Image: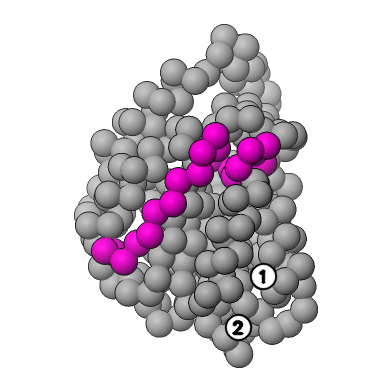
Amino acid sequence: MNPIVREHGSAPARIIALHGGPAAAGDIAPVARTLGERWCVLEPYQRGSGGKPLTVATHIRDLDDVIRERCVEHRPVIVGHSWGAMLALAYAARHPEAAASLVLIGCGTFSLDARAMFEERLAARLSPSDRAEIADTERIDSDDRRLAALGQVMTRAYGHDVVAAGLPAERFDSQAHRETWADMLRLQEEGVYPAAFAAVKMPVLMLHGDVDPHPGPRTRDDLKAHMPQLEYRELAQCGHSPWRERHAAKPFFEMLEAWIEAQ
Protein backbone atom coordinates (compact mmCIF):
# COMPACT_ATOMS: atom_id res chain seq x y z
CA MET A 1 0.00 0.00 0.00
CA ASN A 2 0.99 3.65 -0.18
CA PRO A 3 3.47 4.09 2.70
CA ILE A 4 2.74 7.79 3.35
CA VAL A 5 0.76 8.37 6.55
CA ARG A 6 1.29 11.84 7.95
CA GLU A 7 0.90 12.21 11.70
CA HIS A 8 -0.19 15.45 13.35
CA GLY A 9 -0.04 15.79 17.13
CA SER A 10 1.11 13.34 19.78
CA ALA A 11 0.13 9.67 19.99
CA PRO A 12 -2.10 7.83 20.62
CA ALA A 13 -3.98 8.26 17.37
CA ARG A 14 -7.58 9.43 17.78
CA ILE A 15 -8.58 10.69 14.33
CA ILE A 16 -8.17 9.53 10.72
CA ALA A 17 -8.42 12.32 8.11
CA LEU A 18 -9.29 11.12 4.58
CA HIS A 19 -8.57 13.30 1.56
CA GLY A 20 -10.90 13.75 -1.37
CA GLY A 21 -10.48 13.47 -5.11
CA PRO A 22 -10.27 10.57 -5.49
CA ALA A 23 -6.48 10.90 -5.60
CA ALA A 24 -6.20 14.50 -4.34
CA ALA A 25 -3.66 13.66 -1.66
CA GLY A 26 -3.15 16.37 0.93
CA ASP A 27 -6.37 18.29 0.35
CA ILE A 28 -7.48 17.72 3.95
CA ALA A 29 -4.08 18.62 5.45
CA PRO A 30 -5.26 22.00 6.87
CA VAL A 31 -7.99 20.20 8.80
CA ALA A 32 -5.59 17.51 10.01
CA ARG A 33 -3.08 20.11 11.18
CA THR A 34 -5.69 22.10 13.09
CA LEU A 35 -7.13 19.02 14.80
CA GLY A 36 -3.56 17.92 15.51
CA GLU A 37 -3.23 20.82 17.94
CA ARG A 38 -5.58 18.93 20.27
CA TRP A 39 -5.46 15.27 19.20
CA CYS A 40 -3.26 12.87 17.27
CA VAL A 41 -4.44 12.78 13.66
CA LEU A 42 -3.34 10.32 10.98
CA GLU A 43 -3.59 11.57 7.40
CA PRO A 44 -3.05 8.62 5.01
CA TYR A 45 -2.29 9.31 1.38
CA GLN A 46 -4.46 6.84 -0.48
CA ARG A 47 -2.86 4.35 -2.85
CA GLY A 48 -1.83 5.69 -6.23
CA SER A 49 -2.05 4.12 -9.66
CA GLY A 50 0.19 1.36 -10.95
CA GLY A 51 -0.28 -2.38 -11.20
CA LYS A 52 -3.84 -3.59 -10.86
CA PRO A 53 -6.66 -1.08 -11.40
CA LEU A 54 -7.72 0.59 -8.18
CA THR A 55 -11.04 -0.30 -6.58
CA VAL A 56 -13.03 0.88 -3.59
CA ALA A 57 -12.23 -2.46 -1.95
CA THR A 58 -8.49 -1.76 -2.33
CA HIS A 59 -8.84 1.57 -0.53
CA ILE A 60 -10.93 -0.07 2.20
CA ARG A 61 -8.21 -2.69 2.79
CA ASP A 62 -5.48 -0.05 2.89
CA LEU A 63 -7.43 2.05 5.39
CA ASP A 64 -8.06 -1.00 7.54
CA ASP A 65 -4.32 -1.70 7.60
CA VAL A 66 -3.65 1.83 8.88
CA ILE A 67 -6.31 1.60 11.58
CA ARG A 68 -5.26 -1.86 12.78
CA GLU A 69 -1.58 -0.90 12.90
CA ARG A 70 -1.81 2.65 14.25
CA CYS A 71 -5.05 2.96 16.23
CA VAL A 72 -4.38 0.39 18.91
CA GLU A 73 -5.61 2.33 21.96
CA HIS A 74 -8.77 3.98 20.64
CA ARG A 75 -11.30 3.42 17.93
CA PRO A 76 -10.75 6.49 15.76
CA VAL A 77 -13.13 9.15 14.57
CA ILE A 78 -12.90 9.06 10.77
CA VAL A 79 -13.17 12.50 9.16
CA GLY A 80 -13.53 12.46 5.38
CA HIS A 81 -13.85 15.22 2.82
CA SER A 82 -15.79 14.78 -0.45
CA TRP A 83 -14.61 11.42 -1.88
CA GLY A 84 -12.96 10.81 1.50
CA ALA A 85 -16.40 10.99 3.13
CA MET A 86 -17.62 8.35 0.67
CA LEU A 87 -14.63 6.14 1.51
CA ALA A 88 -15.32 6.58 5.24
CA LEU A 89 -18.86 5.28 4.70
CA ALA A 90 -17.70 2.37 2.55
CA TYR A 91 -15.11 1.45 5.18
CA ALA A 92 -17.60 1.63 8.04
CA ALA A 93 -20.06 -0.57 6.13
CA ARG A 94 -17.35 -3.22 5.75
CA HIS A 95 -15.92 -2.78 9.28
CA PRO A 96 -18.82 -1.49 11.39
CA GLU A 97 -17.01 -1.92 14.73
CA ALA A 98 -13.68 -0.33 13.76
CA ALA A 99 -14.45 3.38 14.20
CA ALA A 100 -16.00 5.42 16.98
CA SER A 101 -17.88 7.72 14.61
CA LEU A 102 -17.78 9.34 11.17
CA VAL A 103 -17.70 12.96 10.04
CA LEU A 104 -18.68 13.57 6.41
CA ILE A 105 -17.54 16.97 5.07
CA GLY A 106 -18.98 17.98 1.70
CA CYS A 107 -19.94 14.37 1.00
CA GLY A 108 -20.14 13.19 -2.60
CA THR A 109 -23.28 11.86 -4.27
CA PHE A 110 -24.93 8.44 -4.00
CA SER A 111 -27.77 8.67 -6.52
CA LEU A 112 -28.37 9.64 -10.13
CA ASP A 113 -30.73 12.40 -9.02
CA ALA A 114 -28.11 13.86 -6.67
CA ARG A 115 -25.46 13.82 -9.40
CA ALA A 116 -27.84 15.50 -11.85
CA MET A 117 -28.51 18.21 -9.25
CA PHE A 118 -24.76 18.64 -8.72
CA GLU A 119 -24.09 19.04 -12.45
CA GLU A 120 -26.91 21.56 -12.82
CA ARG A 121 -25.79 23.60 -9.81
CA LEU A 122 -22.17 23.59 -10.91
CA ALA A 123 -23.03 24.62 -14.47
CA ALA A 124 -25.00 27.57 -13.12
CA ARG A 125 -22.01 28.74 -11.09
CA LEU A 126 -19.31 28.58 -13.74
CA SER A 127 -18.42 32.02 -15.06
CA PRO A 128 -17.21 32.64 -18.62
CA SER A 129 -13.66 32.94 -17.27
CA ASP A 130 -14.06 29.62 -15.44
CA ARG A 131 -15.20 27.95 -18.66
CA ALA A 132 -12.27 29.46 -20.53
CA GLU A 133 -9.83 28.14 -17.93
CA ILE A 134 -11.43 24.68 -18.11
CA ALA A 135 -11.05 24.73 -21.90
CA ASP A 136 -7.39 25.73 -21.49
CA THR A 137 -6.73 22.65 -19.33
CA GLU A 138 -7.50 20.44 -22.34
CA ARG A 139 -4.28 21.70 -23.96
CA ILE A 140 -2.10 20.49 -21.07
CA ASP A 141 -0.20 17.40 -22.21
CA SER A 142 0.18 15.74 -18.80
CA ASP A 143 -2.89 14.06 -17.32
CA ASP A 144 -1.75 14.76 -13.75
CA ARG A 145 -0.98 18.41 -14.44
CA ARG A 146 -4.29 18.75 -16.27
CA LEU A 147 -6.11 17.37 -13.23
CA ALA A 148 -4.20 19.78 -10.97
CA ALA A 149 -5.16 22.76 -13.15
CA LEU A 150 -8.79 21.65 -13.28
CA GLY A 151 -8.77 21.14 -9.52
CA GLN A 152 -7.63 24.70 -8.99
CA VAL A 153 -10.55 26.03 -11.06
CA MET A 154 -13.03 23.78 -9.30
CA THR A 155 -11.80 24.76 -5.83
CA ARG A 156 -12.82 28.30 -6.67
CA ALA A 157 -16.06 27.27 -8.41
CA TYR A 158 -17.08 24.93 -5.57
CA GLY A 159 -16.47 27.67 -3.00
CA HIS A 160 -18.39 30.70 -1.80
CA ASP A 161 -15.96 33.24 -0.35
CA VAL A 162 -12.71 31.30 -0.45
CA VAL A 163 -9.89 33.04 1.39
CA ALA A 164 -7.07 31.61 -0.74
CA ALA A 165 -7.71 28.98 -3.36
CA GLY A 166 -4.22 27.86 -4.43
CA LEU A 167 -3.69 24.23 -5.32
CA PRO A 168 -6.38 22.12 -3.61
CA ALA A 169 -4.01 19.21 -2.99
CA GLU A 170 -0.31 18.37 -2.79
CA ARG A 171 -0.28 15.70 -5.49
CA PHE A 172 -2.63 14.49 -8.19
CA ASP A 173 -2.91 11.08 -9.85
CA SER A 174 -5.35 11.19 -12.77
CA GLN A 175 -5.27 7.44 -13.39
CA ALA A 176 -6.00 6.69 -9.74
CA HIS A 177 -8.84 9.22 -9.88
CA ARG A 178 -10.41 7.59 -12.95
CA GLU A 179 -10.07 4.02 -11.71
CA THR A 180 -11.38 4.69 -8.21
CA TRP A 181 -14.31 6.85 -9.28
CA ALA A 182 -15.33 4.37 -12.01
CA ASP A 183 -15.48 1.61 -9.41
CA MET A 184 -17.57 3.73 -7.02
CA LEU A 185 -20.04 4.46 -9.83
CA ARG A 186 -20.15 0.75 -10.70
CA LEU A 187 -20.98 -0.14 -7.11
CA GLN A 188 -23.76 2.44 -7.04
CA GLU A 189 -25.17 1.21 -10.35
CA GLU A 190 -25.21 -2.36 -8.98
CA GLY A 191 -27.11 -1.18 -5.90
CA VAL A 192 -24.32 -1.89 -3.41
CA TYR A 193 -24.20 1.73 -2.21
CA PRO A 194 -25.88 3.35 -0.43
CA ALA A 195 -27.81 0.21 0.64
CA ALA A 196 -24.72 -1.26 2.35
CA PHE A 197 -24.65 1.68 4.75
CA ALA A 198 -27.47 0.07 6.73
CA ALA A 199 -24.63 -1.79 8.47
CA VAL A 200 -23.28 1.51 9.83
CA LYS A 201 -24.65 1.88 13.36
CA MET A 202 -22.08 4.31 14.78
CA PRO A 203 -22.80 8.03 15.11
CA VAL A 204 -22.48 9.94 11.82
CA LEU A 205 -22.22 13.71 11.41
CA MET A 206 -22.63 15.37 8.01
CA LEU A 207 -21.25 18.91 7.69
CA HIS A 208 -22.21 20.62 4.44
CA GLY A 209 -21.98 24.12 3.00
CA ASP A 210 -25.26 25.72 2.00
CA VAL A 211 -23.87 26.75 -1.40
CA ASP A 212 -21.78 23.66 -2.10
CA PRO A 213 -22.82 22.51 -5.60
CA HIS A 214 -22.97 19.00 -4.18
CA PRO A 215 -26.61 18.87 -3.00
CA GLY A 216 -26.34 18.38 0.76
CA PRO A 217 -30.03 17.91 1.61
CA ARG A 218 -30.51 15.39 -1.19
CA THR A 219 -27.45 13.37 -0.20
CA ARG A 220 -28.56 13.60 3.44
CA ASP A 221 -31.89 12.04 2.48
CA ASP A 222 -30.21 9.33 0.36
CA LEU A 223 -28.03 8.38 3.33
CA LYS A 224 -30.56 8.83 6.11
CA ALA A 225 -32.81 6.23 4.51
CA HIS A 226 -30.14 3.69 5.53
CA MET A 227 -28.60 5.47 8.54
CA PRO A 228 -31.39 7.11 10.55
CA GLN A 229 -28.86 8.20 13.20
CA LEU A 230 -27.16 10.60 10.74
CA GLU A 231 -27.01 14.19 11.98
CA TYR A 232 -26.97 16.94 9.34
CA ARG A 233 -25.63 20.42 9.99
CA GLU A 234 -25.51 23.04 7.28
CA LEU A 235 -22.94 25.83 7.27
CA ALA A 236 -24.07 29.26 6.05
CA GLN A 237 -22.13 31.14 3.35
CA CYS A 238 -20.09 28.02 2.72
CA GLY A 239 -19.00 26.00 -0.28
CA HIS A 240 -17.39 22.58 -0.61
CA SER A 241 -14.36 23.02 1.66
CA PRO A 242 -15.46 24.83 4.85
CA TRP A 243 -11.95 25.44 6.21
CA ARG A 244 -11.16 27.55 3.14
CA GLU A 245 -14.18 29.82 3.63
CA ARG A 246 -13.97 33.32 5.09
CA HIS A 247 -17.27 33.11 6.98
CA ALA A 248 -17.64 29.39 7.65
CA ALA A 249 -14.21 28.25 8.82
CA LYS A 250 -14.69 29.24 12.47
CA PRO A 251 -18.14 27.62 12.99
CA PHE A 252 -16.96 24.60 11.00
CA PHE A 253 -14.06 23.91 13.34
CA GLU A 254 -16.23 24.61 16.39
CA MET A 255 -18.80 22.01 15.26
CA LEU A 256 -16.13 19.49 14.27
CA GLU A 257 -14.12 19.77 17.48
CA ALA A 258 -17.23 19.61 19.66
CA TRP A 259 -18.29 16.42 17.91
CA ILE A 260 -14.88 14.78 18.33
CA GLU A 261 -14.67 15.83 21.97
CA ALA A 262 -18.02 14.14 22.67
CA GLN A 263 -17.00 10.77 21.22
Q: Earlier in the sequence, mark 1 or mark 2?
A: 1
Residue furthest toward the top? Answer: 128
Residue 190 visible, this orientation: yes
Query: Residue shown at 57%/60% (left/top)?
Result: 256
For label 1, the residue is 42
Q: Looking at the rendering, which quadrant does residue 2 occupy?
A: bottom right
For label 2, the residue is 71
26 is within the stretch colored magenta? no
Amino acid type shown at disc 2: Cys
Residue 84 visible, this orientation: no
Query: Residue shown at 48%/52% (left/top)?
Result: 207
Q: Provide residue 238's location: percent of width, then percent of height.
A: 55, 37
Residues packed near mark 2 inside 10 Å, few (<14), some (14 to 19) or many (20 plus): many
Q: Provide residue 205's location: percent of width, then percent of height.
A: 44, 61
Quadrant of the snapshot with the N terminus: bottom right
SS at circle 2: loop
Amino acid type shown at disc 1: Leu
Q: Is residue 73 above or below residue 22?
A: below
Q: Is residue 77 above or below residue 19?
A: below
229 is within the stretch colored magenta? yes
* Left or right of residue 65: residue 225: left
Q: Looking at the rendering, which quadrant does residue 69 occupy?
A: bottom right
Q: Nearer the viewer, residue 73 or 182?
A: 73
Per the model, the C-alpha gap separating discs 1 and 2 is 9 Å
The number of discs equals 2
Q: Is residue 143 above or below residue 126?
A: below
Does the residue at mark 1 contact the one at mark 2 (Cβ under 8 Å)?
A: yes
The secondary structure that dominates the magenta segment is loop
Q: Which residues are magenta?
A: 227-248
Q: Provide residue 263's location: percent of width, then percent of height.
A: 51, 77
